[in-house]
Amino acid sequence: MRRTLKNMAAALLFIIVLSTAGSVTAFAAADNNAVGAEITQESSATGSKAMAAAVCVGLAAAAGAVGMGIAIAKSSESISRQPEAEGKIRTSLMLGLVFIETAIIYALIVAILIIFVL
């Protein structure tokens, strides 16, 4: 259990470092490429939208992947302990995985809305 928590904490730290480095790079590129005040504001807004969308989808995908991994591990343990209940366990697992994947797709839709609507 502690090993899993350490791995999850390391993965979260890695995601935070990557998103921070990406935002610094995006803002630096926006500042260097902009000529006038209007272009600077537009570039900054575009870079901010891209970073918001990337963080939205990245966190949702990471959380969904962790959730799916835990669900699959627990269902495999349950099936190995009680093989006669395999059908019910598998049905519940698939239903749970569908709900997790739906949440990730909603995050993708929110990211698309952030980019194109706002």
Image (cartoon, rainbow, N blue to C red):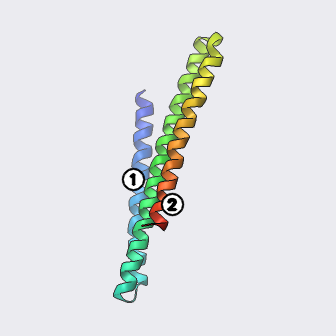
The image shows a total of numbered marks equal to: 2
Residue 108, given in percent of the width and then of the height, sits at 52, 53
Residue located at (55% from left, 27% from top): 73
- List x then y, in percent, for residue 23: 40, 65
Q: Nearer the viewer, residue 75 or 91?
A: 91
Q: Which mark is residue 16?
A: 1
Q: Is residue 83 above or below residue 65?
A: above
Q: Earlier in the sequence, mark 2 or mark 1?
A: 1
Q: Position of residue 62 (x, y in %)?
A: 48, 45
Q: Residue furthest bottom?
A: 36
Q: Residue furthest front?
A: 117
Q: Amino acid at mark 1?
A: Ile
* Above or below 74: residue 118: below
| Neighbours of disc 2 within 10 Å: few (<14), some (14-19), many (20+) | some
Disc 2 residue type (three-letter)? Ile
Q: Residues within 10 Å of mark 1 (few under 14, many from 20)?
A: some
Report the residue at 43% width, 50% height from top.
Answer: 14
Tell me if label 2 and label 1 are in contact, CB under 8 Å.
no
Image quadrant in which the C terminus is located: bottom left
Q: Please name whichever residue, 73 or 86, is drawn nearer the observer in this view of the structure.
A: 86
- Residue ID for mark 2: 112
Q: What numbered label is drawn on residue 91?
A: none
- Which of these two is toward me, 4 or 58? 58
